[in-house]
Image (cartoon, rainbow, N blue to C red):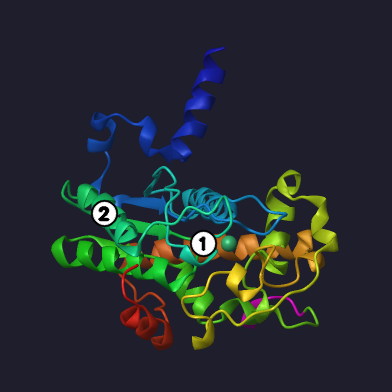
Amino acid sequence: MKKKTTQKKDTNAKLLKFEELSWKQIDGLEREKTIFFLPISPLEEHGPHLPVGTDLLTARDSAVEAIKILNKKHPELTYVMLPSVPIGYCKFNTDFPGSISTSGRVVRDIVYSVGSSLASHGFKFLVICSYHMAVGHLKGIYKGMGKVMSKYDMKVCEPWGPYFHNNEVEKREPKLGFDTSKELHAGFRETSLMKYQYPYLVDESYTKLQSIYRDLNSPAVLGKTFKQLGLKDGYVGSPARADADYGRWFFSETVDVYVKAAIALYEGKQLPELPQKIKLMMKSLFWQ
Ligand SMILES: [Zn+2]
């Protein structure tokens, strides 16, 4: 009986959840050796077949999995999961029930508030985990990160944006015989991911959904909502092609990106950056 209790304690110690700690326990964490993870992505429609929490669940689960690996690779460091923040900018598909969009400013303020609250107590490392790649959302995250780093001695990174927007997925994924770069929202990639992670949350109707493509980065679609673009079911891509094996690869890729970023952040190494094109789009985008 006694042994069992100790084992449970050990397992819990591997994944520290911020909300379960007292201020005393948080104060007891080594400032120079603790890395915090903050999942932040909006709840938004993901086609008729996927849950609105697709991005948030993926960001959180990848961070949890990354922490498990980091605990083995670098047990000398401490990793803390902050609660997932279901907030983000996704104005373009708010014409579907289930999408909850805030302005990029709100995202910026949340990232800054979390970062500065930790940094003002001497903590040094924060990894922002977002799986939602809309430029308006990223603008909020990067503005918040920049503000934290300019005011405090804290290093903050957001690893998935640079990976995704530098087309690393297309460069590294297994060859599939079709153009996956058009799978922009709730299409092949995300449906595969959810088929792997949460098969019971994927509506079987996905096998009957026809492929629909739109270039969401073209100036012609700027300011238009999904329904105005004729995306009546709220997905862009080919969900019917979904494959759980690809989902497994994609998920482990996300985890790997977080693991590498956390170590690079801790070691003070240069992290991959968003491409110039995205930085310019962020600059030219007004807060909405
Ligand atoms: Zn998504």
Left or right: residue 45 compared with residue 89: right
Residue numbers of the magenta segment: 171-175
Three-letter residue code for mark 2: Gly
Residue 102 vs residue 237: left or right? left
Q: Residue furthest right?
A: 208
Q: Is residue 285 left or right of residue 31?
A: right
Q: Is residue 71 highlighted in magenta?
A: no
| Majority SS type along the magenta span | loop
Can residue 258 be seen here?
Answer: yes
What's the residue at 38%, 31% (across, down)?
20
66 on left or right of 27: right
State the quadrant of the C terminus: bottom left
Tell me the element at label 1. Answer: loop
Q: Measured along the vertical axis of the image, is residue 67 above or below residue 46?
A: above
Give the answer, above or below, for where 142 lies relative to 281. above
Q: Nearer the viewer, residue 215 or 247?
A: 215
Label 2, on which residue?
115
Locate residue 151, reporting x and y percent.
Answer: 14, 63
Rendered residue at 69%/54% (across/down): 194
Percent x, y of residue 124? 25, 56
At which x and y percent is residue 149? 21, 65
Q: Residue at x 77, y 62 (%)?
A: 245
| Mark 1 beta carbon near ligand 1 (under 8 Å) | yes
Specify the farthest residue to the front: 228
Q: Quadrant of residue 255?
A: bottom right
Which numbered dot is residue 131?
1
